[in-house]
Amino acid sequence: MTSQNSSLITPISRLTGGYGSLNAFAAVTGPGGARGFLEFLGAVLDAVETPEAHAVDTDGLLIHSEARIGDSCLMVVDSKPGWPFTPALLQVNVEDPHEVLRRALAAGSRIITEVSPFYGSTIARFQDPWHNVWWLYGPEDADAPPLEWDPETAAQEGESEVHATICRAMEQLAPPSGP
């Protein structure tokens, strides 16, 4: 692993339009395809689609689209027939994880981890209808006990609920059924 002062990655992206040094791409299949997923992002995370980035392939599927979530860009594409299921694993910093979970649940998601203290802040997780897994990091929780990871103690006492919920979710991850 290299130091944080890597000369390989630009500290500020040269791409214009709010792109970061790293931009995630989600290939989705499931309810409403990429168009449905973009609507979900708007309803749950207040995402705004970039209309000029919207490109439809000759088969009618979205080959490229972009959603702005805060200061980040999530690129979205329809998974083509024959492409393997590749769920996105996404982390989002949010001000109100309870509200985001409420919206996600109302939009057909499954809660993986309820809002829980996590290393001085809060964490929550959900799986969306396209079977992507979202980690929500909330603001600092002054009342949260400091958590320390000690593998030997964890093995003796069993996993924390925060750890156990994601392990179960990842073991059960499968493509959504239907179009």
Image (tube, rainbow, N blue to C red):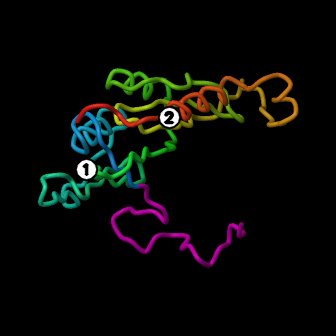
* The quarter of the displayed image where residue 54 is located: bottom left
Name the image quarter holding the C terminus: top left
Work out whether 60 lies above or below 98: below
The residue at the point 49 percent across, 44 percent down is: 89
Foreground mark, 1 or 2, reads 1
Q: Is residue 129 magenta?
A: no
Which residue carries the number 2 mark?
Answer: 95
Which residue appears farthest toward the bottom when viewing the image? Answer: 7
Main secondary structure type of the part rendered in magenta: loop
Determine whether the residue tagged by mark 2 lies in a helix, strand or loop. Answer: loop
Q: Is residue 22 magenta?
A: yes
Magenta region: which residues? 1-24
Work out whether 161 lies above or below 45: above
* The quarter of the displayed image where residue 108 is located: top left
The kind of residue tagged 2 is Glu
169 with respect to 66 (left or right): right
Q: Which mark is residue 89?
A: none
